[in-house]
Image: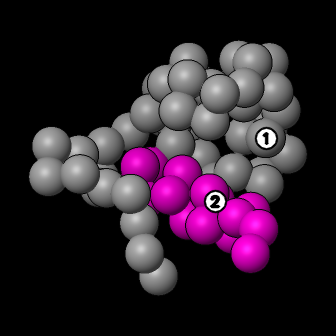
Amino acid sequence: METNLTPETNPNQLLSADQVAERLGISIALAYRLMKSGELPTVRFIGSVRVLETDLESFIQAHKSE
């Protein structure tokens, strides 16, 4: 599976909904819906919800059209 990770990108980086929305070019509300529905896997701790960089890349690859 090919990813768009760059040398500066940490594959274990946790992204906020704002960052997910920016990277996908969608609204923050839609990013939260994807995260809440489980379509985009999340990490939850101390009241925060984040997405692993690698999970976002997997999500992008899974939704990529040929």
Which of 25 and 54 lies nearest the eye of the viewer? 25
Q: Quadrant of residue 37?
A: top right
Marks 1 and 2: CB-CB under 8 Å?
Answer: yes
Where in the figure is residue 64, as x and y percent of width and height? 70, 64
Q: Residue at x 79, y 41 (%)?
A: 34
Q: Residue at x 52, y 43 (%)?
A: 51
Of badges 1 and 2, the one in the foreground is 2
State the extent of the magenta-drawn residues as a range.
Answer: 52-66
Determine crowd level at label 2: few under 14, some 14-19, many 20+ residues with C-alpha closer than 10 A. Answer: some
Q: Secondary structure at mark 1?
A: helix
Determine crowd level at label 1: few under 14, some 14-19, many 20+ residues with C-alpha closer than 10 A. Answer: some
Task: Report which residue position mark 1 lands on.
Answer: 34
Lower sequence index among marks 1 and 2: 1
Where in the figure is residue 11, as x and y percent of width and height? 29, 55
Q: Residue at x 71, y 17 (%)?
A: 28
Which of 19 and 26 lies nearest the eye of the viewer? 26
Asked if residue 12 lies left or right of residue 40, the reply is left
Q: Secondary structure at mark 2?
A: helix
Question: Relative to 34, does residue 55 appear above or below in the rendering?
Answer: below
Q: How many discs mark residues in the rendered view?
A: 2
